[in-house]
Image (cartoon, grey):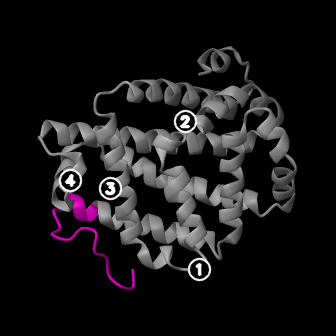
C-alpha cells in the first residue's frame, strides 16, 4: 500500500489536509482489520446489515427512479471487503488529487472516506460485541443484533454516520449534474486501465451513472436518513419490531 506517499505529499488547504488525515487513518484501520481474528465475522455483520437496509427500504429499492442509486450504495459504498483495489488506488493517486482537483471536491472525498471508515469501524465493533456475547455472526437474529447495537456505546459515531450520508449524498448529486464529468469519465477509461486504476475509475463511473439515473436524490437522501434515524431510535428504545416502519414514512 501507499502510506509513505500519503505522508510525503505536501498539501496547502484545510480540505487537503483533512483528506490526507482521513486516508492515513483509513489506511491504518484497513491493515488492523485485515489482521483481525474477527474479520470473517465483520464481513458477516456487513452482509447482514446490507440485507437489512434493502428490506427496510424495499419500496425505494424497487422504485425505478431509485434502484440504481441504492444498488450502488449497497454494492460499492457498503461493500468494504471488495474495495481493496479501489482504496489502494486512492492512496496511490493522492498526490495528483491534491494538485489538480478543486478544493471543495477534496472536501467531498474526505466525507466519503470518513463515511467508509466509520461504517467499517462500527461493523468491527459490533462483531466484537457479538463475539464477547458468544453470538455467532453467521446466524444473527434481529434481536441479537439490536442487543449488540445497544451495548456498543457508539451513538455519537452513528449520528455522525447519518450526517455524512446526508451531506456527502447531496454534494455528489450536485457534481454529477455536470455533463462534463460524464464525458471525462468516458474518455479516461482506457488511460485509467493502462495506469492500473481500473478499480477506482469503475467505482467513479458507477457512482456517476447511478446518481444521474435517480429522479430526486435530495428526496431519497432525506427519506433514507429520517428512516434510519427512526430505526436507531427504535433499537435504543427496545422496540419489539425496530425495523418495521409506518407505511407512509
- The residue carrying mark 1 is 64
Quadrant occupied by the C terminus: bottom left
Q: For the point 59% across and 19% down, which residue is it? A: 3
Compute the Cα span from label 3 to label 1: 24 Å
Position above or below: 96 against 164: above
Element at label 3: helix
Element at label 4: helix
Q: Earlier in the sequence, mark 3 or mark 1?
A: 3
Element at label 1: loop
Q: Earlier in the sequence, mark 2 or mark 4?
A: 2
Compute the Cα span from label 2 to label 4: 26 Å
Q: Earlier in the sequence, mark 1 or mark 4?
A: 1
Position above or below: 217 against 249: above
Check residue 125 for magenta coloring.
no
**Pick the front one: 237 or 31:** 31
Specify whether residue 101 is in view. no
Compute the Cα span from label 2 to label 3: 20 Å
Q: Count the marks.
A: 4
Specify the segment rendered in magenta. 233-249
- The residue carrying mark 3 is 48
Compute the Cα span from label 4 to label 3: 9 Å
- The residue carrying mark 2 is 84
* Residue 241 spot, x, y in % from top left: 20, 71
The tag on residue 139 is 4
Left or right of 114? Residue 107 is right
Q: For the point 71% across and 18% down, which residue is it? A: 9
Amino acid at each position: 500500500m501507499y502510506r509513505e506517499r500519503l505522508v510525503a505529499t505536501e498539501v496547502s488547504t484545510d480540505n487537503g489536509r483533512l483528506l490526507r488525515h482521513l486516508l492515513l487513518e483509513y489506511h491504518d484501520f484497513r491493515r488492523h482489520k485485515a489482521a483481525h481474528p474477527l474479520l470473517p465475522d465483520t464481513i458477516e455483520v456487513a452482509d447482514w446489515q446490507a440485507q437489512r437496509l434493502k428490506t427496510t427500504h424495499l419500496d425505494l429499492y424497487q422504485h425505478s427512479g431509485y434502484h440504481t442509486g441504492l444498488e450502488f450504495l449497497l454494492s460499492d459504498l457498503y461493500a468494504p471487503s471488495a474495495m481493496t483495489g479501489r482504496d489502494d488506488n486512492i492512496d496511490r493517486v493522492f498526490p495528483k488529487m491534491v494538485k489538480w482537483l478543486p478544493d471543495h471536491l477534496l472536501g467531498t472525498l474526505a466525507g466519503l472516506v470518513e463515511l467508509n471508515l466509520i461504517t467499517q469501524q462500527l461493523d468491527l465493533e459490533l462483531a466484537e460485541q457479538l463475539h464477547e456475547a458468544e453470538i455467532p455472526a453467521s446466524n444473527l437474529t434481529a434481536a441479537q443484533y439490536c442487543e449488540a447495537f445497544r451495548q456498543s456505546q457508539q451513538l455519537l459515531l452513528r449520528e455522525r454516520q447519518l450526517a455524512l450520508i446526508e451531506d456527502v449524498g447531496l454534494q455528489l448529486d450536485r457534481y454529477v449534474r455536470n455533463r462534463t464529468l460524464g464525458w471525462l469519465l468516458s474518455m479516461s477509461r482506457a488511460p485509467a486501465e493502462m495506469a492500473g486504476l481500473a478499480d477506482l475509475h469503475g467505482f467513479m463511473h458507477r457512482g456517476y451513472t447511478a446518481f444521474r439515473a435517480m429522479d430526486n436524490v435530495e428526496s431519497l437522501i432525506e427519506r433514507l436518513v429520517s428512516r434510519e434515524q427512526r430505526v436507531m431510535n427504535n433499537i435504543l428504545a427496545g422496540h419489539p419490531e425496530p425495523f418495521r416502519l409506518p407505511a407512509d414514512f
